Amino acid sequence: MIHGKALRLLKPRDEATGYSIFVYLPEEQGLHCNSRSEIICAGKLPLFSPGIPLELEVEWKHDCFYHVAASRICTSRKAYSLFFLDKIKGISADTANRILEGLDNDIRKLLELDDPEGYLAKIPGAKRFAGPLLEQLGYISATEGLFFELSSLGIEFIQIDQLVKVYRADARECLKQDTYDVCSCIGIPFLQADYLARYFEKGRMDVDRMRAIVWELVRRYEEAGHTRIRIKDMITEFYRLLKRSPWPWVISPVYLFCIMQGMPEIRIDGIWIARNKRFQQEKEIAKNLSRICSASQVRDISENDIEAMEADLDIRFLDSQKELFRAMGKNKLILLTGGPGTGKTTDIKGAIRLCLMADPKARIGLCAPTARAAQAMKAASGHPASTIHSMVGITPHSACEGHQELPYDLLIVDEMSMVDTEIFYHLLRSVKTGCQVILCGDPDQLESVGCGAVFRDLLECGKYFTVKLWQIMRQEEESGIVENCRRIKQGRTDLVVDQTCRIYRCGTEEEAVQLLLPMYDKNTDWSKQQILSTTKTGMLGIVSLNRRFEMAEDGQECYRYRGFDYKRGDKVVFVVNNYKAGYCNGDIGKIEDIQADGVVVRLEGKRIYLSGKGMDDIMPGTIMTIHKAQGSEADEVIILLPEYPRTLLSRNSLNTAVSRAKKKVVILAVGNALETAISNVMQHRRETWLSELL
């Protein structure tokens, strides 16, 4: 064990794990030091600030580099204790010295007293600092203690930090008594919570454990897109989960179902199990669709009306496009489908103009599931558009349980394949009776990131008038982009290669990376270039490439989190829905400011502050998964297709990626990954209540 001060960081500290590379000035002699008697240390620290006194257990590696096996805040010397007292705003040197006199110059001993407040009250000038001093020492002691105890169980610094901030001095006791609830509260995954429960000597048959298993299984299925689970599938997944747990012994599913019977949040219905909330949402969706469709018609649309609208817009619509306008005179709910370039946006412009010609005072609303999709809708249609959550009034200051009626006479929703059950539920309950609704989307795109298959269910039920656009309108006939989208959907591997489409076949992932490097321009605007990958992991995965491409330069200000360097001006993508905070899964923002404990992201005119566990809501957006890019476009799109995992190589995924490009698409395919993707028609079908309720 050596003693000294951590002088400065050589690289930004990872605020999730605590991993730091820093310069350390040791007191001890005989170490391999540089010319300034310093050593370079690397390891996980629970806390860091320049000059902080630390006791380190180290292992020499080479030259003056040491690996930190363990660390502890050092207060055993007066100078070290004064370091922490100096952090208390307003405290004088005389007061600090008087406090230490009765503590053997070790500020930690203040926490060992029976009455630390009473001790400080007797020292002239110290009483008013009792609150902040004890709070600081309590946080340091609790964080450090839990870090030493729990880091070996895989618990990260950011989780421990959150635990201490929420439960303060009672953090360990709360974690021990209510392991699963506390872990759920602060975002510790189930399997880690399970290992903690065994560490705290909980029982494998504990009721709290069974409830936690139920929620974990429901979470996994909703994450896969389902809103309900077959009982037999849940039992299979239950056994798989047990095999990975610290108690791998079999538990009868009968016992699990007995526990479920007492959980009002869980619905058991025949062969199905689901979150009751999800069933109620889909039930309300079906009810509101019926309400919207049953409203009486308020206007008729003739061929003369359509011709007048064409003359007003100076556009000649195809007969297939006119089907939408004719349907507007007969149907309150219309589904508009079509692939890229088939004229959906032009049809939307026509629908808006037709509505206003019939009633100049008509109120028209346009919305989409993400900010980027709404912005694209606005730019293409020339009419204001917003995100669904902002339209229905889900804000940081609103309650999701309530809703406000929308004033619109015509409501048009784009990118319906991206709309999940929850947000569609909130939208429909806000649509007033009498409003006409047009739902637009491409059924060949990937389904929503959130659970549900809303657009699929609406199309398959056959109850609603559907307009299908198929003829290419958007791009020149010689463009390979739209033609290749068509061929991909047909399962053809003979893709067009021209000035708009390039295909590079690589023998290895490293070869693909080397081809990618000169193509990537870090100074290119987001709308000009986008790099997409099928996977998060591996050499061509978004994690590895974002760390490689976005690493901060020496001395460059950044906020490091989970190995990613977040810098001013960086593109980031939100990876969860947080409607109250104002962002959706797939929204793309820009880092505007770096702060000591987080970042500020600019997203479509609003500033969003993220810190602590909130940083898990974003990832670098330089390289994104194809799923996250849905709803956005760029002039040039570079698509990375590694051979594995093969389950992520699908026709829908490739079609979605190619259709993101407006001018040029480049495909870097390893081995036969391109052919695998085209031939793989995704068989995964989401199970929903809505498919039965409609």
Image (tube, helix red, strand yellow):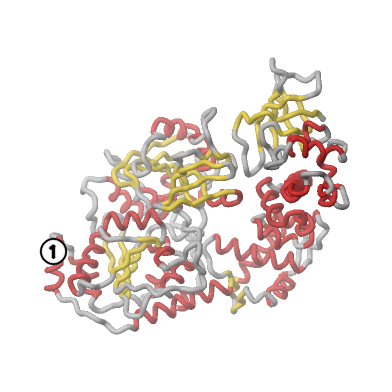
Does 62 sit above or below residue 319? above
Q: Position of residue 105 (x, y in %)?
A: 84, 36
Q: Nearer the viewer, residue 72 or 320?
A: 72
Q: Residue at x 54, y 27 (%)?
A: 554
Q: Position of residue 314 (x, y in %)?
A: 13, 60
Query: Label 1: which residue?
Result: 312
For the N terminus, the image quarter is top right
Q: Nearer the viewer, residue 318 or 133?
A: 133
Q: Is residue 502 left or right of residue 203?
A: left
Does 565 sit above or below residue 336? above
Q: Residue furthest front?
A: 124
Amino acid type, label 1: Asp
Residue 520 in view in this figure: no
Q: Position of residue 252 (x, y in %)?
A: 75, 69
Q: Residue at x 50, y 33 (%)?
A: 510
Element assignment for label 1: helix
Q: Is residue 10 left or right of residue 485?
A: right
Q: Residue at x 22, y 55 (%)?
A: 473
Q: Position of residue 577 (x, y in %)?
A: 50, 59
Q: Residue at x 41, y 35 (%)?
A: 522
Q: Residues within 10 Å of mark 1 (few under 14, many from 20)?
A: few
- What is the quadrant of residue 240 in the picture? bottom right
